[in-house]
Image (cartoon, rainbow, N blue to C red):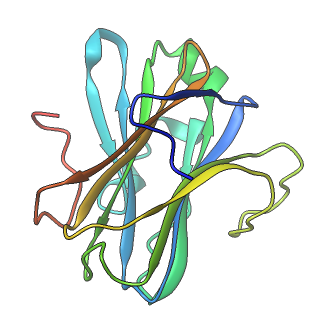
Amino acid sequence: DVLPTGSRVACTGSAVRTFVHWKDAFDIDSSLIVVGANNALTSMGWFNYSGKSFGNDILFSGDITGSKGAEYFDIDLDALAARGCKYVIQTFHGYMSKLDRGEIYAGYQNKENLQTKAWDPKNIEMQFRVQGDSRGCIAFAIDIQTREVVILNQIIDDDSRVVNATGF
């Protein structure tokens, strides 16, 4: 079941993996928007990951372009808190498919006892199915200060194929 927009649930662990995984869709791209000190916005995804804006505090799985797969970010919440960051917002876009195809799930997992660099559905704390006649979704935010996941589950009325924090 999907919790109502605005619901807050405890985020366990200081190291988490946010993800989107799919089957029978094509090339779903996971992205983050990090809200930093002074509300500065930084977008992260396949399009700029090599710049490593947050060093090893946020690591990306890489771009998966098939009809079945997963993309994810490994996030050190303690390190981001020390940087003055406020939120990490999980978004994703259908680069080659709208979000009304196949099965698409977004969520997060606790990285404790998750000793893998590859996708593994172990330790999933929260996930929900996403479906909409659009290319974009703002799935959820992690409030770094309170360590809560804020459910957003907002389909973006947009045909963009890549996240953009401008005007967010």
Q: Relative to residue 72, is residue 147 depicted above or below?
A: above
In the rendered image, residue 41, in percent from the top left (x then y), is placed at 26, 29
Identified at 76% across, 31% down, the residue is 13
Identified at 30% across, 55% down, the residue is 137
In the rendered image, residue 164, in percent from the top left (x then y), is placed at 18, 47
Q: Nearer the viewer, residue 121 or 164?
A: 121
Q: Tell me: 154 left or right of 21.
A: left
Identified at 49% across, 29% down, the residue is 7
Q: Quadrant of residue 37?
A: top left
Q: Tell me: 56 left or right of 104.
A: right
Q: Quadrant of residue 81?
A: top right
Q: Relative to residue 59, is residue 86 depicted above or below?
A: above
Q: Relative to residue 89, is residue 153 depicted above or below?
A: below
Q: Relative to residue 33, is residue 63 depicted above or below?
A: below
The quadrant in which the C terminus is found is top left
Residue extending furthest right? 113
Q: Tell me: 12 left or right of 76.
A: right
